[in-house]
Amino acid sequence: MALEPVQVLKDVISEVLESMFFALVEFEESGLGDGTFDYASEILLSNHKGSIAICLRVREEFARMITANFLGIEERQVDEDDLKDSLKELTNMVGGGYHERFNYADRHLGIPSVWKMGSEETDTTQSGAEVDFAFFGRPAGSAAINHLPGCGQ
């Protein structure tokens, strides 16, 4: 039975957030939230044919909460560097889990990047697979898998 990218993405996000960040999320149909995110992160799975980009976008309040959980500190102690570092780690774990599930022996996992989204940025991601997730019923984030040009799977 072939693995479905959306289900694999949901499973990996759920496992990583639950086991490493102590956060249980619920998944929603894409586009149900208002698309307002404060931070974005990305990691590439690449080979000679191209790349698969795994992109995560989260709201700041959720990012602060999971960062505090991950570091074992109070949310008020979380600074910008801590927040960005934990989002890089989240993205790295999600990318690694996705890579492992599909057994991409010919792809290497890149180094995650993270940035604060500006007010002029809107969520216009076009992807092969996308999921939104909520924390206690409140929109928390979104994840997308983008197959970059020239990428064969």
Image (cartoon, grey):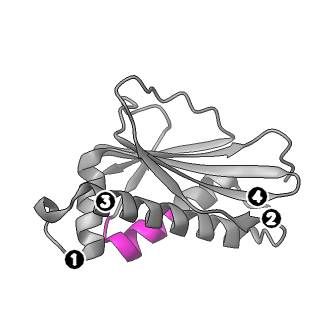
Q: CA distance from mark 4 to mark 3?
A: 27 Å
Q: Counting other residues with Cα less than 10 Å from the Cα at mark 4, is it few (<14), some (14-19), or many (20 or more)?
A: some
> What residue does disc 4 label?
46
Residue 81, disc: 3
Q: Residue at x 47, y 31 (%)?
A: 31
**Along the viewing direction, whichever of 149 and 34 lies nearer the viewer:** 149
Q: Which portion, as a residue range, is magenta? A: 13-23
Q: Counting other residues with Cα less than 10 Å from the Cα at mark 3, is it few (<14), some (14-19), or many (20 or more)?
A: few
Amino acid type at circle 3 is: Asp
Circles 4 and 1, Cβ within 8 Å, touching? The answer is no
> What residue does disc 1 label?
72
Tell which circle, 3 or 2, labels the residue nearer the N-terminal end.
Answer: 2
The label nearer to you, 3 versus 2, is: 3
Q: CA distance from mark 4 to mark 2?
A: 24 Å
Q: Residue 67: x percent and y percent?
A: 29, 64
Residue 1, disc: 2
Q: Is residue 127 left or right of residue 149?
A: left
The label nearer to you, 1 versus 2, is: 1
Q: Where 19 sits versus 120, above or below?
A: below
